[in-house]
Image (cartoon, rainbow, N blue to C red):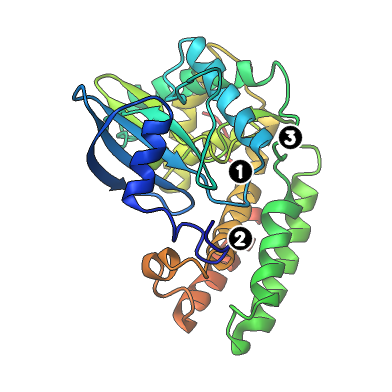
Amino acid sequence: MSSTTTPFAGLTPDLILDAVDAAGFTTTGSLLELNSYENRVYQVELEDGSFLVPKFYRPGRWTDAQILEEHTFSTELKDAELPVVAPLSRTGTTLFHHAGFRYALFPRQGGHAPNLEDPENLRVLARTLARMHALGAVRPFETRPTLSVARLGRESSEFVLAHGFVPLELEKAYASVTAHLLERCEGVLEDLTSVRIHGDCHPGNLLWRGDGPHFVDFDDCVNGPPIQDLWMLLSGEREEREAQLGIIVPAYETFADFDDESLRWIEALRTLRILHHAGWIARRWDDPAFPRAFPGFDSMRYWSNHILALREQQSALEEPVLRVP
């Protein structure tokens, strides 16, 4: 298989089509690469005119057991009639191996990003997430990680410093602001409640079709607080976000209890996401797809703006907690 720095170099069109054929399908040779950085995802046409979406997992990130836990969770949700795009099972498994690569096969799902300015859309998403979290609370993941300050924040900031991504002139400022934020986040998030959650529930992972959503890409599902999936539906100024919470929370409580205490975790979770995103790009910088996708990452401008965003989070963490009207 290809090296860790170019993990998908050997993933040729012929290999992709052969992998789908090896799982028991017959492809036509038509292949379209879809947008994905962490993994590689394609649309493949089958002989009967239908389409499949094979997803090839980044080597070395997850174990087989962790991937299968992801698949089990999304399948449980689908079986409970939640709008989740779950992997297909063939010969008793959802995880396949071919030529050193691991992959899963998904049905093609059309749709577009949801309009989160529509109150009814927010209600639908909140009710759906409540059902997802209620099922997620039945038991925890055993092999997949639990959301933590150490994993998302501290490890990320230490990586970018240790590997020289922060320009020398900005290292002191970056180290100072991250140390303060991590200490603050650890204090805020010390009593997190955890259930199985989507983990990366931004609008890009919500495909809206007709009058409802379809949840895709459970690649980052973890044990974590339900508010992690909910806060990403919020946008705008404080008054706008509180108004959105006034729509989301009552709808959520149709199917699950909402923990009012979790509102104070939002800005700490946002901070961890900002830190983790930079760490994620840094860890993948040797993959040629990442410099192409994030061309300014190694610039003074990027890190100046990143430090500014972190300082804004320092202020946000000191503001009063959002309230539900």
Residue 106 in the figure: left or right of residue 13: right
Q: Amino acid at mark 3?
A: Thr
Query: Counting residues from the N terminus, which is met first, the one under dot 3 or under dot 2?
Result: 3
Query: Which residue in the protein does label 3 denote?
Result: 143
Query: Which residue in the protein does label 2 denote?
Result: 275
Kindly identify the residue that appears in the image at 67 percent across and 66 percent down: 157
Residue 243 in the figure: left or right of residue 181: left
Kindly identify the residue that appears in the image at 55 percent across and 33 percent down: 198
Give how far apart the Cα atoms at labels 3 and 1 are.
Answer: 26 Å
- Whether residue 206 is visible, yes or no, is no
Label drawn at residue 266? 1
In the rendered image, residue 182, in percent from the top left (x then y), is placed at: 74, 60
Q: Is residue 64 above or below residue 74?
A: below
Label 1 Cα crowd, 10 Å radius (few <14 / some 14-19 / many 20+): many
- Asked whether 140 or 300 is in front, the reply is 140
Label 3 Cα crowd, 10 Å radius (few <14 / some 14-19 / many 20+): some
- Asked whether 24 or 147 is in front, the reply is 24
Give how far apart the Cα atoms at labels 3 and 2 are.
Answer: 24 Å
In the rendered image, residue 75, in percent from the top left (x then y), is placed at: 53, 19
Query: Counting residues from the N terminus, which is met first, the one under dot 3 or under dot 1?
Result: 3
Q: Amino acid at mark 1?
A: Ile
In the rendered image, residue 77, in percent from the top left (x then y), is placed at: 53, 17
Label drawn at residue 194? none
CB atoms of marks 3 and 1 within 8 Å: no
